[in-house]
Image (cartoon, rainbow, N blue to C red):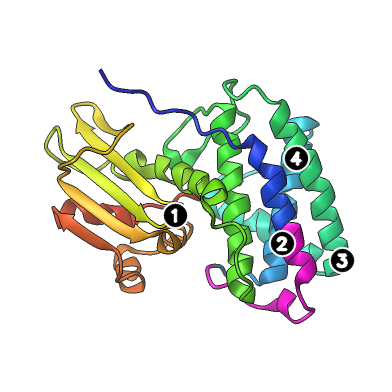
């Protein structure tokens, strides 16, 4: 009998990750606020503004039940979901470029306190307001939706650490492993179109103190994530934790990913394992 996957409960981590973000932002020089980020088309201030947008939109919709009555906040008929999300982000970031870093930090701090309280109040197993599409879910439970929000907070904060050269305070296991664990819920969906013999197993092994091993198995009904990685998989993909979060948070072609990350190694069936390069655990 298959062992069911455990839910990834991270609501209690939001105050900690927010505190470390606040400490980082308050330490930045005026010049550092406008540095380009290494993993994004945005600069540091744009990323901070994007985080504020996510918190305020979540509070407005989920806590307050407010949805804008005009069509500006809705997906257009010919607009892809990724295009829609990018448009919302771009509109917000352009408008908030008039805000000083001090004003922005104060708003983020206020919103994050409210957001942590909201997440702590939710029944983890009740239906979520949003499905986690990158995991292939048409309906998610609250714990998964909250976990998705945690990955947003974690990886954008890490982008700011990287861009400014400040030593990261969020890569220890307590804060980073849950993020990687959530990212890996995209594995079965990434492989949903991949043909393989029933019983084939792919393992992703992430090295480093926050790492671990995640596995999927091909069943007659499709690919399914396994609670534990077996000893003899058909393919094993190995990467460092610093490479893993960068691979999984930006859309790029497989060949581009292989060129960018030559230190990702595949043992066993290389053609099967190479599909891991296609995995993206964010929407936009």
120 to 255, vertically: above or below: above
The reply to whether callout 1 and callout 2 are in contact (CB within 8 Å) is: no
Q: On the rendered structure, is 74 left or right of 95?
A: left
Q: Which residue is mark 4?
A: 115
Badge 3 marks a residue whose secondary structure is helix
Residue at image position (51%, 37%) is 132
Q: Which residue is mark 2?
A: 48
Distance from the alpha carbon under mark 3 to that under mark 2: 11 Å
| Residue occupying image coordinates x 33% and y 42% | 214
The magenta stretch is 21-39
Residue 272 x %, y %: 18, 51
Q: Nearer the viewer, mark 3 or mark 1?
A: 1
Among numbered discs 3 and 2, the one appearing first in the sequence: 2
The residue depicted at 58 percent of the width and 22 percent of the height is 127
| Whole-number angstrom distance, CA of label 2 to CA of label 4 | 16 Å
Locate the N terminus by quadrant: top left
Q: Is residue 241 magenta?
A: no
Is the C-beta separation of discs 2 and 4 under 8 Å?
Answer: no
Specify which label sits upstream in the sequence, 3 or 1: 3
Does residue 281 show up?
yes
Give the number of callouts. 4
For label 1, the residue is 209
Residue 235: x, y in percent? 18, 49
State the SS at label 1. Answer: loop
> Which comes before the other along the chain, label 1 or label 2?
2
Q: Which residue is mark 3?
A: 102
Q: Is residue 6 left or right of residue 275?
A: right
């Amino acid at each position: 009998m298959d062992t069911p996957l455990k839910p990834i409960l991270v609501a209690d981590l939001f105050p900690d990750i927010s505190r470390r973000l606040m400490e980082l932002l308050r330490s930045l020089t005026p010049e550092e606020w406008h540095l380009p980020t290494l993993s994004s088309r945005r600069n540091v201030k744009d990323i901070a503004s994007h985080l504020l947008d996510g918190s305020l939109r979540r509070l407005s919709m989920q806590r307050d039940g407010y949805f804008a009555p005009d069509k500006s906040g809705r997906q257009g008929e010919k607009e892809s979901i990724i295009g829609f999300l990018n448009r919302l982000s771009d509109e917000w970031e352009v408008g908030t470029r008039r805000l000083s870093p001090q004003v922005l930090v104060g708003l983020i701090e206020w919103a994050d306190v409210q957001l942590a309280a909201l997440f702590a109040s939710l029944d983890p197993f009740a239906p979520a307001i949003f499905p986690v599409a990158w995991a292939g879910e048409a309906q998610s439970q609250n714990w998964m939706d909250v976990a998705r929000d945690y990955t947003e907070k974690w990886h954008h904060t890490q982008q700011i650490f990287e861009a400014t050269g400040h030593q990261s305070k969020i890569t220890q296991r307590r804060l980073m492993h849950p993020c990687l664990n959530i990212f890996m819920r995209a594995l079965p969906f990434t492989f949903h179109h991949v043909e393989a013999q029933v019983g084939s197993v792919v393992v992703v092994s992430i090295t480093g103190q926050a790492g671990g091993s995640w596995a999927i198995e091909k069943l007659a009904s499709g690919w399914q994530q396994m609670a534990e990685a077996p000893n003899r998989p058909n393919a094993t993909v190995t990467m460092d934790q610093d490479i893993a979060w960068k691979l999984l948070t930006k859309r790029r072609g497989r060949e581009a990913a292989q060129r960018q990350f030559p230190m990702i190694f595949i043992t066993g069936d290389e053609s099967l394992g190479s599909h891991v390069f296609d995995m993206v655990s964010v929407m936009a």
